[in-house]
Image: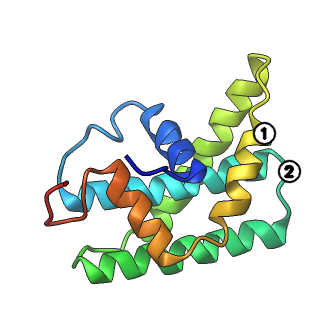
């Protein structure tokens, strides 16, 4: 098994912490939408942890560019991208607020992963998504 980048691991953990999102459907489209929500959650969590506005904007632009390219490459719909990303932002913030209320400070890990993720290349993102989803859309996992 390849080493999964920390931001993807964290984003999937954030996604799986919200009932109904990850298990909604196994379709490629639903999975893509879950990736968009997870990217938003990473952004929202980083905001809750004090990430700078320029870094948040760069992360959001990188996620949009990479995920929309992914959608185009695999003939997925990205028309609801902005709403899904905003949904994720709210969930990421809420998750960090809950962690802080319970006495857990996950900000160090979130911000470290966020810094990597805000400049992740398309190929690295695609490889990480393939790893966590057992293959790319239309392909079987090795």
Secondary structure of the residue carrying tag 1 is helix
Name the spot of residue 50 as percent of width and height, x first: 85, 50
Question: How would you rate the neighbour count of disc 2 (Cα within 10 Å): few for under 14, some for 14-19, many for 20 or more?
Answer: few
Q: Are marks 1 and 2 in contact (CB under 8 Å)?
A: yes
Name the spot of residue 56 as percent of width and height, x first: 74, 66
Q: Residue furthest top?
A: 102
Residue at the spot 35% in from the left edge and 74% down from the top edge = 78
Foreground of the two, 140 or 117: 140
Quadrant of res 117: bottom right
Tell me: residue 104, above or below residue 51: above
Residue at the spot 65% in from the left edge and 36% down from the top edge = 94
Foreground of the two, 62 or 21: 62
Q: Give left or right: position of 89 versus 135.
A: right
Q: Which mark is residue 19?
A: none
Name the spot of residue 43 as percent of width and height, x first: 65, 56
The residue tagged 2 is 50
Secondary structure of the residue carrying tag 2 is loop
Foreground of the two, 63 or 80: 63
- Colouring chosen for the image of the structure: rainbow
Quadrant of res 92: top right
Q: Which mark is residue 107?
A: 1
Of callouts 1 and 2, the N-terminal one: 2
Q: Give left or right: position of 3 versus 130.
A: right
Question: How would you rate the neighbour count of disc 1 (Cα within 10 Å): few for under 14, some for 14-19, many for 20 or more?
Answer: many
Tell me: residue 135, above or below residue 138: above
* Cα distance in 3D space between marks 1 and 2: 9 Å
Name the spot of residue 1 as percent of width and height, x first: 37, 46
Q: Give left or right: position of 50 versus 78.
A: right
Q: Give left or right: position of 22 versus 91.
A: left
Residue at the spot 44% in from the left edge and 72% down from the top edge = 67
Tell me: residue 74, above or below residue 91: below
Disc 1 versus disc 2: nearer the observer: 1
């Amino acid at each position: 098994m390849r080493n999964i980048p920390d931001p993807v691991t964290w984003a999937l953990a954030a996604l799986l912490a919200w009932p109904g999102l990850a298990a909604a459907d196994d379709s490629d489209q639903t999975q893509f939408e879950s990736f968009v929500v997870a990217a938003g959650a990473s952004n929202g969590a980083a905001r809750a942890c004090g990430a700078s506005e320029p870094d948040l904007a760069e992360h959001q632009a990188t996620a949009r560019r990479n995920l929309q390219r992914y959608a185009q490459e695999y003939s997925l719909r990205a028309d609801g991208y902005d709403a899904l990303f905003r949904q994720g932002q709210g969930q990421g913030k809420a998750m960090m607020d809950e962690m802080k209320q319970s006495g857990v400070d996950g900000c160090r890990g979130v911000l470290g992963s966020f810094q990597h993720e805000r400049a992740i290349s398309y190929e690295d993102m695609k490889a990480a998504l393939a790893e966590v989803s057992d293959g790319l859309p239309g392909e079987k996992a090795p």
